[in-house]
Amino acid sequence: MNSRIKKIRKTIFNREHHRYRQEIDPAVFTKFTESLAAEGLSDVQRAARRLVTVFRMEKPVVFADEKIAFMRTVQIIPEIFTPDEWKKIKETNRVHELGEVCNICPDYGFTIGTGLEARRKEVIEGLGNCVDSGKKEFLQAVLESIDAVLELTERYAKEAEAVGNREIAAILTRVPRYDARTFHEALQSFRILHYALWASHNYHNTVGRFDQYMFPFLKADLESGRLNYDEAFELLEEFFISFNKDSNLYPGIQQGDNGQSMVLGGVDEDGNDVFNLLSEMCLHASRELKLIDPKINLRVHKGTKLEIYEMATELTREGLGFPQYSNDDVVIPGLTAKGYSLKDARNYVVAACWEFIIPGLGMDVPNIAALSFPKVLDRCLHEKLSGCLSFEDFMSSMETEIKAECARLAEDTKNLWIAPSPFMSVLMDGCIEKATDISKGAKYNNYGIHGTGLSTAVDSLAAIKKVVFRDRSVSAEKLIKAVDADFKGYDELLAMLRYEAPKMGNDDDDADGIAIRLLDIFADALEGKKNDRGGCFRAGTGSAMYYLWHADEIGASPDGRRQGEPFGANYSPSLFVRCKGPISVIKSFTKPNLERIPNGGPLTMEFDGTLFTGDESTGKVALLVKSLMDMGGQQLQLNVVSRERLLEAQKHPESYRNVIVRVWGWSAYFVELDRKYQDHVIKRQEYSI
């Protein structure tokens, strides 16, 4: 990292750039929203008007020595509907999250390679040929959105000239209006397009296969001598820093939950490995900068070399909480089984956290709902257990309830309403040609349902099988009373259930067999179901924030979990399980057929920071990760944590601002998390090799 990059990184990390943000009276935005209603504008007209208005309010900020420009100064993106209008929309529609297009992957590469002017001409041609008033209205909104982006870029170019940054001024006269010709132009074009999506109130805008669509620009510059390696790497590092300029203004559950996920490596549409020089440079830049964005996701397969795992493990060693790994050998067959073409499946990326989506072609909603396995079990425990003559009877009741719950969740997704996004439509395949906003759908319109608390449910079922049906040491009635009492007065039973009963994560075939069966039931329950956009439903093992929310919906559970204790995050052992070690965890969590669970959900493991004492340990962790993938693991994310250090960080946050942890599918600065999320990270299992 050279001195210029160090200076820029320090400026952003210390938030010195926040002084350029405008303090605008919120009443201004309220009046704007009310004016849209008063004019009687359509949804798509309002969306375009918002982007135009926000960009006109922006004040270009360019520094004399920067090479990647654009920095947000308007802190609030206004609503396009009044509270009363939102109320009416929600009365007859399902509104997911903020009701905006989100958590999808645009096709940045196409627009970077063609330029907005070419897209603009397509829109104008479409307007000339279109007779449908609704389609004309959409195309006009797209035209206004493109013009808003180009107008702001022109103002930035003038500001760059005014501060003496002629290099940026020249680049901004070229991109994103026209096709990028160099690596520098391509990076700057991406920055503007990505920035415009956030200003459109779209969020969790992922980066996609960055090393694939950007590599041709890098390769051409290096081969022509326009750039040398060091110059290209400097541009890349500054580009990475730019992701952190505005990220605290992006919507998410917590700071850091912003969806800026970058995918590296994997195979191409012909099945050939495509990890390249830019992939490697991205890993090195991320390791050197030690920032939470962009979040690195590495696609791997059986042909991935160990040295690539070792490069990636260096990021884990630095405590970044990424890369997150995804296994092409499991993901691609899982997606094709759900109707994705082989070509598209091979081009998959991850959404904001881990869910699998297709860039440019997918309007999937991969987090539309979540099934709580422990909640289903709790219902069966209280309503069915006493009447069951065998464990098989009880599992049959679980299957019935899971299927009923999945049917209810699927039904609840009907009439999904999403606000239009004319500028996002520019970056998605076919929208301009069909004159249809991306909010109406795309080639793929599938929904993902998380499966939460799996290990809690598995461990509870394993305990019931052992103590109620096999050993007959505890009656169903006594177990139910103990659970309802939160095990108060049942200390011996609590200790036995918590620490002696079979647990998922210890390579116990009895417990792991239950996990296999539960996930198969989950997949079967969604098989053949269609949403009202014509898409399918995908089961997943991710939890998102539900590991806290769903845990609060029930009391204690038969595995010895007390009331108020959270579930394990994602696809991981319960928090209090005494695991034999990482190998036993890997063996347990690779036994299910994860191709049937193609919504994703990473095995989440924590390692003590003292593990990395030398190159040998790094190699061992890399080999462990490779072994997991070769054994059929679907996804993995690793944290390097020190319980003592995190406890100190809670006491003295000002001294630990740079401590990074993996939360559920994203990394964040530990001291910026709410206490409940901090506590969960501290309680997670720490492994050693």
Image: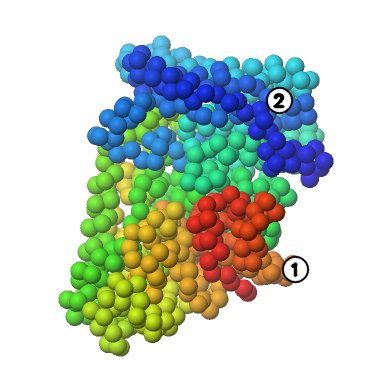
At numbered mark 2, what does the secondary structure look like: helix, strand or loop? loop
Q: Which residue is mark 2?
A: 62
Q: Which residue is mark 1?
A: 614
Residue type at mark 2: give it: Val
The answer to which of 493 and 433 lies nearer the viewer is 493
The answer to which of 687 and 313 lies nearer the viewer is 687
Residue type at mark 1: give it: Gly
- Camera-side mark, 2 or 1: 2
Tag 2 and tag 1, C-beta contact below 8 Å = no
Task: Residue at 46% x, 14% y: name it.
Answer: 124
Residue farthest to the top, as pictured: 128
Q: Is residue 166 above or below residue 213?
A: above
- How packed mark 2 is, by other alpha carbons closer than 10 Å (few <14, some 14-19, many 20 or more), is many
Q: Is residue 492 above or below residue 621?
A: below
Task: Residue at 35% x, 76% y: name it.
Answer: 487
Quarter of the figure that contains the N terminus: top right
State the CA–CA distance, disc 2 to disc 1: 43 Å
- The coloring applied to the image is rainbow
Numbered tag placed on residue 442 in the rendering:
none
Task: Report how many numbered discs are placed on residues in the image.
Answer: 2
Residue farthest to the left, as pictured: 387
Task: Residue at 35% x, 29% y: name it.
Answer: 83
Task: Residue at 38% x, 85% y: name it.
Answer: 492
* Residue 351 in view in this figure: no
* Relative horizontal placement of residue 659, taking residue 194 as reference (left or right): right
Give the x, y percent position of residue 384: 20, 71
Quarter holding residue 659: bottom right
Give the x, y percent position of residue 9: 73, 41
Give the x, y percent position of residue 532: 27, 40
Q: Is residue 18 above or below residue 129?
A: below
Quarter of the figure that contains the C terminus: bottom right
